[in-house]
Each structure stands twice: as C-alpha cells, then as structure tokens.
Image: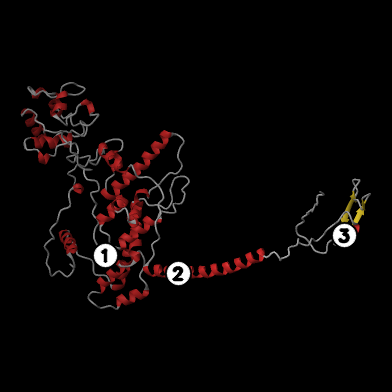
Amino acid sequence: MHRIQGWAIACLILGLLSNDNHVSFADEADDSVQPVASLLAARCLGCHSGDEPKGGLDLSSRQAALAGGDSGEVLLLEAWPDSLIWEYVNSDQMPPKKALSNEEKAIFQDWLAAGAPWPKDPIDVFARSTEVRAGKDWWSLQPVASVPIPEVDPNTPWIKNPIDAFVWQQLQQHDLTPSPAADKRTLIRRLSFDLLGLPPSPDDVEVFDNDDADDAYDRLVNRMLDSPHYGERWARHWLDVVRFGESNGFEYDQPRNNAWPYRNWVIQALNQDLPYDQFVRLQLAGDVLQPDNYSAAAATGYLVAGPHNTTLPANDQMRMVMAQDELEDLVGNVGQTFLGLTVNCARCHDHKFDPISQHEYYQLAASLTGVTHGERSFPPEYPAKVQQRKTEVQARLVHLQQQIDAVHAEIRAAILAERSDAAVSRSAPVPRLAWDFTNADANALASVRLHGTATLDANGLTVNGPQSFAASTPLETKKKKKTLEAWVMLSD
C-alpha cells in the first residue's frame, strides 16, 4: 500500500556542500574571532577572496591580508588606525554598495585593536549567507530536523491527522477558518484527478456515494493508490524533471526506440512504493550496486535520458566541447533533481548565489564523466499469467514442429528413393517449336516458310541475303515471355 508523503531533497554527493580546506566557525575555539570572521565572510570575502580577488587583496587568511594588494599594505598591526583597510571601512568607502553599520564597525575596530587575529585556517567564503548569496547556513541547506506537532484541541473535528494540526495552527494565527467539507461526488472527482489524472467512472461515483461506512474514504484512497494509473500519473512529473525524451533532440531528433525501459521502471517504482533513497541510488548507480539485476540497470537510464547529439563534428576540439556540454547537462540535472541546486552554474566560476565552488563542480563532474550512451539488451518481462500462457504456447510449437519434421523426413526419403532408382526414365521437356535444318521433313512441330533467297536442303538452311530468312507458322499457344534456346550438337 502506498503512503502519502513528501519527498525531501536527498543529499546526493557527500561533501558537495562542504569544504575541508576551510574553517567552520563552530569549530573555532576563540570566540573573539567569531564575530569578525562572520563579518568578513558576509561583507568582504565575496570580492576579496579566491583566485582573482578585487584589487589583488585577499582577506580570507591573515597571511594573504598582510601581503596587501594592488595599493600596497592595507593592514598595519603596529598602527592599525593608520591602516588603509580601516580608512576605507571607517569612511564608508568599503563595502562599496552598503557601508558597515556602527555595530559592525565597532566589531571591526575591536578586531584591529586586538592585533587582527584570524582563524587558523582560511575563512570559508561560503560559510555565511549574505545579502546577495546563500551560504552554508541557508535554511534549505540545513539538516532535516524533527518538528514538534502543534498542540491543539484534540476534540477539534476538522483535525484528522498530525498534518492537519500544522494547517490548523496557521489558520488560527491568520484568523481563518477551514473550508466546508466537500460532498462525496466532489470528493471522489478531486481524488481521482489528483491521484490518477483521470475522472472517476460513473459506477465508482455511485458506489462511493452510497457507501456510508466510516472507512469509505480510506478504502477509496487505498484503491486508487493501488491502481497502475497512479504510477503512470506521477511518473509523468518525474520524467519531466529528469528531462526524459524518447528522441535524441537536436536538428535530426532521431527516435530513441530503447528509452522505454527506464520510463516503465519509474512507473513500476512508484506503483511498488520504492523507498526514495533506493529510488535515487538505483538511478545513479543501479548497474554498479546490483550488477545482476536488469531492473536496476534499467533505472540508470536516467543518466542518458536527456538530449544526445549523434552528429559528431569533424574537429577534435569541437567534439571535446560537445562532450563537456553534454556532461554539464547531466551534472546540472543531477544537481537540480536531487539537490535542488543549479550546480552547473559553477562550471566556469564559483557559484554566484549558492555555496558551490568551481572545484566542487568538477569533483561532481568527474564522478559522472564515465557515463556514455549505448545499447543494452534486457530480457522481456511478462506478468505471471502471460508467462504461463507463453510457456504453454512454446511447448505446443515444439510438438507441432516435431510433427512437421516427421512429414518432411517422409517426403525427403521418397524423393531420394525416386532419384536413386536407375530405372526411372528421364527425358528432356517437349519444346513448343523445333526445327531441324538438315531435314525439311523433320519439322514436325512447325512448318517452315522460306523468305527471299533462303534455301533449305540436305546441307541445311542457307540464308544468303539481307532479306532472306526462315519463319515458322504462328504458335497456337500465347507466350507472355519469349525465350529462344538453341540445342547444338557438335560433331566429333
């Protein structure tokens, strides 16, 4: 039986949203460093970090900051009030778009006065969310946590399950009341369109409308969840997410005749209530996790479900670019489908809005670069009744073939016996027309008329001029095709 439940975004690649080379603020023992580290990460490191920091100034580590930038030294530990960095911050020149508040300036000033201590490791630019980008502290990137069910009056008739308690709480907070209960005919239509994508049959409507049992609705839900149409309905949404198509796309858009096993696997997985973690793992590496399971191999059709250009350019460099573009499509879809993140934006640079570095993008791409398009044979799968009938038909075919072979053997033996009998006379077929040019009386099958100066005597037929020829009388039998054969006997 299916259970109605939300599908949370899975953490697909461990370490994708973490970086071991950067410090976590929670691990830093010196509390005095925490405020300024958070301030630098949120307001400064977006520009002053990475491979090409603005102004050549990198503030992610103490060593880099002391090295200064294009304007020379910016941090003077012995005379911090004269430091260029403090001059820019205190005069509201930096950060350029929005100056630090007085509270933030006080944190910055106290930090400089304390000798500008940094965490032991470089500050992670992705650690904190800013006004323009999400950090690792963004709400959607936090681990799933248990939320206590709101306490409501247990006698409230509207509440049927724990989810209703959350809805009821929000309704109360916004001074709203629930909508009135729908009548049975409306309810079965809503449920059928939602779960199956189809209207209910008139008979189903009548049965449900006349069912006064307390569990009538629960049984209706379970019956629809057990319908094969349930998987077909919801597989359409998943196949849209994973960019599934039954043709290759691009200008030729050839049909992809063997894409259907993956489509059917998704439908079957939904109908069988496959746990979501298995649903994800099998699509990413089913052939590796279960190498002897054809169904698991069919699940990996996800990896090649997207557009595929079968027209290769002649230039080697263009072929490599095309391969990388196709890999980016796969990496991007893995990120969007299973992480809810646009990972492919980090192909050319660190992500501008999500905490994903270019280095992490290529780590993920490297794990998928071995995916190639190809064909794989799958044994046909049949329902039990069809398989039983197939076995019976195959056995019947074997029996009939044995009977046919016996008849063929009998006929073959008779033919061979006839051929081996030396007494059997053999004669050439009788021709429709035959001439013997050495004996005029021998033309029994047709008379010959001579034309021009042609002569026929004991020496044979003599044709001694352009208008000389011999012709037979017309045949009584019509011939659709004309064939001339000459039987020539050579003298010794």
Question: Is the residue 287 above or below the residue 364 in the image?
Answer: below
Give the residue at the far right of this rendering: 453
How far apart in space, not on screen, are marks 3 and 1 (Cα)? 95 Å
- Mark 2 lies on residue: 395
How far apart in space, not on screen, are marks 2 and 3 (Cα)? 63 Å
The answer to which quarter of the image holds residue 102 is top left
Q: Which residue type carries mark 2?
A: Ala
Question: Is the residue 486 above or below the residue 35 in the image?
Answer: below
Q: Which residue type carries mark 1?
A: His
Q: Does residue 101 appear in this view? A: no
State the image coordinates of residue 394 (x, y, percent, origin top left): 45, 67
Give 48 or 283, whichever is nearer the viewer. Answer: 283
Question: Is the residue 369 above or below the residue 214 in the image?
Answer: above
Rate crowding at label 1 as few (under 14), some (14 to 19) or many (20 or more) other CA atoms within 10 Å.
Answer: some
How far apart in space, not on screen, are marks 1 and 2 (Cα)? 39 Å
* Quarter of the N terminus within the rendering: bottom left
- Mark 1 lies on residue: 2
Q: Which residue type carries mark 3?
A: Asn
For the residues carrying marks 3 and 1, which lies nearer the camera in this image?
Answer: 3
Q: Does residue 153 appear in this view? A: yes
Q: Which mark is residue 215?
A: none
**What number of labels is visible?**
3
State the image coordinates of residue 170 (x, y, percent, origin top left): 17, 59
Rate crowding at label 2 as few (under 14), some (14 to 19) or many (20 or more) other CA atoms within 10 Å.
Answer: few
- Mark 3 lies on residue: 443
Q: What element carries label 1?
A: loop
Q: Is mark 3 on a helix, strand or loop?
A: loop
Give 31 or 406, whichever is nearer the viewer. Answer: 406
For the residues carrying marks 2 and 3, which lies nearer the camera in this image?
Answer: 3
The answer to which quarter of the image holds residue 465 is top right
